[in-house]
Amino acid sequence: MQQSIIFKTLLVLASVIVFIFIASGYLFVQNDKELIKEIRDYNLSSAMKALDYRLEISLKNNQGKMQDMTNMIGKNSSLFLLNFDIEGLKNSLIFDMKREGVKAIRIWDSSMNELFLQAFKEGNQVEFKKILPKEFEKYTPINRHIIHNEDGVEKTIGEITLYYDESLIVDIINKLKKNTTDEIEQFNAAINAKLLKSNIIKLYIAIGFLITILVVSTILLIIFVNTPLKRLKTGLDDFFLFLQGKKQSPQEIILETRDEFGQMVDSLNKNILVSAQLHEEIRELNTNLEKKVAHRTQELAEINQEVQDSIEYASTIQRSFLKSPTIIKESLNDAFVIWQPRDKVGGDLYVYEETKEGTLFGVVDCTGHSVPGGFMTMLAGSVIKKLASELSNNPAKLLSELNLAIKQQLNQEGKESLSDDGLDMGLCFINKDNTVLRYAGAKMDLIYFKSLYLDNGQEQNISYELNIIKANKQSIGYKRSKSDYEYTNHEIHIEQFESFYLYSDGITDQTGGNKNFPYGNKKFKNLLLSIQDKNMSEQKDFILSTLNEYQADNQRRDDITVIGFKP
């Protein structure tokens, strides 16, 4: 979904304003709350201080009244104490005990040093008992001496203790505090309600202010931004259509303003004009270049076709140089030939020649593959064919002569030679009676398997023994190969149920499998061992299917040649 620049700008602007509004509103609300809290705390503190002061004054006044009362009761009690008039004193104390706040009065006779009379309130009754209940210890006591004045001489005759209750005054003040606190809280609740109403009004004003800003901003953006951008887009689209070849010429962008957009349009119009001229020049150059490329492509196609035809013809020549595998199979009783060049022309070769002494055959692995390798196979094959007529029963001598001939043909006898090409080879000769096999090799071993019969008394089991005849370590024809090197013949007396194999390194170097490793000599020899119970045609099919499965999607690395036979 496309979003215009106005939408994006308004979105950013609205987000900033909303953020500022929320932050400011939060700060204002917090400030109002703090101010109201301070006012509440101040009012409450002032009221509590005033009530505490009132409590202090009331307690002092009450204490003064009680002290005056105590003095008065003491003065009234002096005559009763002198006359030992307990009943009269009781009546007097009953009257005094009715005064508010008085809880108990105790009269002490100093002359007798004993309690004269004690009165205290118990419920609504005045009791006279010697022992004052323990609960009266919470009341405030006032002590005064009872003085008797006789002939102008004052004498202490006793002591009065008055217990009075201050909790009435404290309760009154506490009740006033609670009422005052409730009134302040009600006042604060009313203030908070008014403040909330004020904040809602502010919110409506802010929303209206926000909407006004967005509307004005939208109008300004449409007039001063969106319209110029649309004209710019239309002009650029028109220019791009011209560049794509869908229009003959670009149109000038028209914008009658002198602001940044106007300056941008002027710059774009100049660039469009220059680009249009360059585009025309490039289009002419491309037209000419396309013609030249088409002509050159046609020439290269013709050359490539000639090269391909030459390679095809070279492949035909190379294949015609090889003996048919059917002929080899018929001559060697049971045999197979696998010859698969990596390209149309290969660097591998198998040779087969029949002479009056017997049959000569082998595998040749020349330097390289494709066309260069093909030239080497033709050269090597021609020389081998010539030498086979005289040296078919002496493979070692034939290899030595081949080595010298290749070095001479390619001028590779000196260090100044421009090339350094050669081959590896395994060569076998079998006499007419198929009783003797003579082998010589240049870095290509001959392997063969013997059948062994094991008799355990009940049945015979067949096992196969792997044998390897090592080739000489010198290749044929290279500059480093010695011209006078003599290869070695190995003679084997052929027995029934033996199978022989020669192969180039293309099959063992082929990569594949789970780890993309080369197939390897060890694995290939184990493969041959596992198929000894099959005939040569079945062995060929099994080797090819195993190779294709192992290779999978990997490319072929080299030419592959394998010869297997059972004399």
Image (spheres, grey):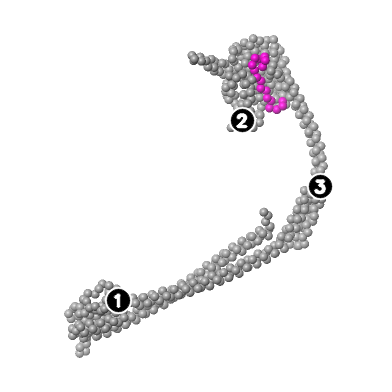
Q: Magenta part of the protein: which range?
A: 329-345
Q: Which residue is mark 3?
A: 281
Asked if labels 3 and 1 touch by Cβ distance under 8 angstroms, the answer is no
Left or right of 214? Residue 166 is left
| 555 to 63, vertically: above or below | above
Give how far across and how far down residue 414 sits, in percent.
70, 22
Quadrant of residue 131 in the image? bottom left
The one nearer the camera, 491 or 231, is 231
Gap between marks 2 and 3, in whole Å? 54 Å
Quadrant of residue 377 in the image? top right
User: Residue at horizontal 68%, vertical 27%?
Assistant: 342
| 110 to 465, vertically: above or below | below
Give how far across and how far down residue 299 sits, in percent.
80, 34
Give how far across and how far down residue 73 sits, in percent.
26, 83
Which amino acid type corresponds to the residue marked 2 in the rendered image?
Gly
Q: Is residue 487 visible?
A: no
Label 3 packing within 10 angstroms: few (<14), some (14-19), many (20+): few
Q: Which residue is mark 2?
A: 512
Gap between marks 2 and 1, in whole Å? 112 Å
Report if residue 332 lies within the magenta region: yes
Left or right of 183? Residue 293 is right
Asked if labels 1 and 2 touch by Cβ distance under 8 angstroms, the answer is no
User: Residue at horizontal 69%, vertical 62%?
Assistant: 221
Mark 2 vs mark 1: which is more N-terminal? 1
Mark 2 vs mark 3: which is more N-terminal? 3
Quadrant placement of the C terminus: top right
Secondary structure at badge 1 equals strand
Mark 1 vs mark 3: which is more N-terminal? 1
Left or right of 153? Residue 516 is right
Q: Which residue is mark 1?
A: 140
Which amino acid type corresponds to the residue marked 3 in the rendered image?
Glu
User: Residue at horizontal 51%, vertical 69%?
Assistant: 33
